[in-house]
């Protein structure tokens, strides 16, 4: 039996999956990159690392974090989704017997 939280997740993830991985990445990588750029800028400014290398470092680091977080989130949600579906199939088969 699905909990309300699992039902919301399954509905949400089914909608995300219909758009495909590319559109998911195209949406979330820039957003997460922007957020990590703000955080990195704040942290780097605290250690007084200003200059051209500052902007390059923040840009590269933010992009790497944005890609890594987005890919990790996609894979984690896929595993969770498939686990819930497999569990429901198993429980359904057991109820039939």
Image (cartoon, helix red, strand yellow):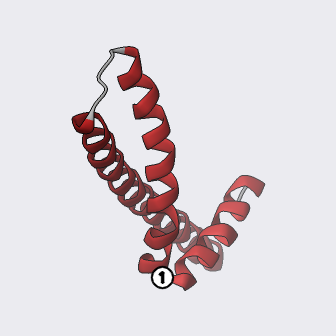
Q: Position of residue 63 (x, y in %)?
A: 33, 52
Q: Position of residue 54 (x, y in %)?
A: 28, 34
* Quarter of the image that includes the N terminus: bottom right
The image shows residue 47, relative to residue 55, as above or below, that is above
Q: Quadrant of residue 93?
A: bottom right
Label 1, residues with CA under 10 Å away: few <14, some 14-19, many ≥20 = few
Along the horizontal axis of the image, is 25 left or right of 13? left
Which residue carries the number 1 mark?
Answer: 20
Task: Name the residue at the left extreme.
Answer: 53
Task: Name the residue at the top extreme.
Answer: 47
Along the horizontal axis of the image, is 21 left or right of 27? left
Q: Quadrant of residue 53?
A: top left
Q: Quadrant of residue 7?
A: bottom right
**What residue sits 47% from the left and 33% below the top?**
39
Along the horizontal axis of the image, is 50 left or right of 15? left
Provide the secondary structure element on which disc 1 rests: loop
Q: Position of residue 52 (x, y in %)?
A: 25, 38
**What residue sits 72% from the left and 53% below the top?**
5
**What residue sits 40% from the left and 15% below the top?**
46
Q: Position of residue 10 (x, y in %)?
A: 64, 68
Q: Nearer the viewer, residue 22 or 16?
A: 22
The image shows residue 24, relative to residue 77, as above or below, that is below
The image shows residue 80, relative to residue 92, as above or below, that is above
Q: How many marks?
A: 1
Q: Nearer the viewer, residue 91 or 9?
A: 9
* Quarter of the image that includes the C terminus: bottom right
Along the horizontal axis of the image, is 62 left or right of 14? left
């Amino acid at each position: 039996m699905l909990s309300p939280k699992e039902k919301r997740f399954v509905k949400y993830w089914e909608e995300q999956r219909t758009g495909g991985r590319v559109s998911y990445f195209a949406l979330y990588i820039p957003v997460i990159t922007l957020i990590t750029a703000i955080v990195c800028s704040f942290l780097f400014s605290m250690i007084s690392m200003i200059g051209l290398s500052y902007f390059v470092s923040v840009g590269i680091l933010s992009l790497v974090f944005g890609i890594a977080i987005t890919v990790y989130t996609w894979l984690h949600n896929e595993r969770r989704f498939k686990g819930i579906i497999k569990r429901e199939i198993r429980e359904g088969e057991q109820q039939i017997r």
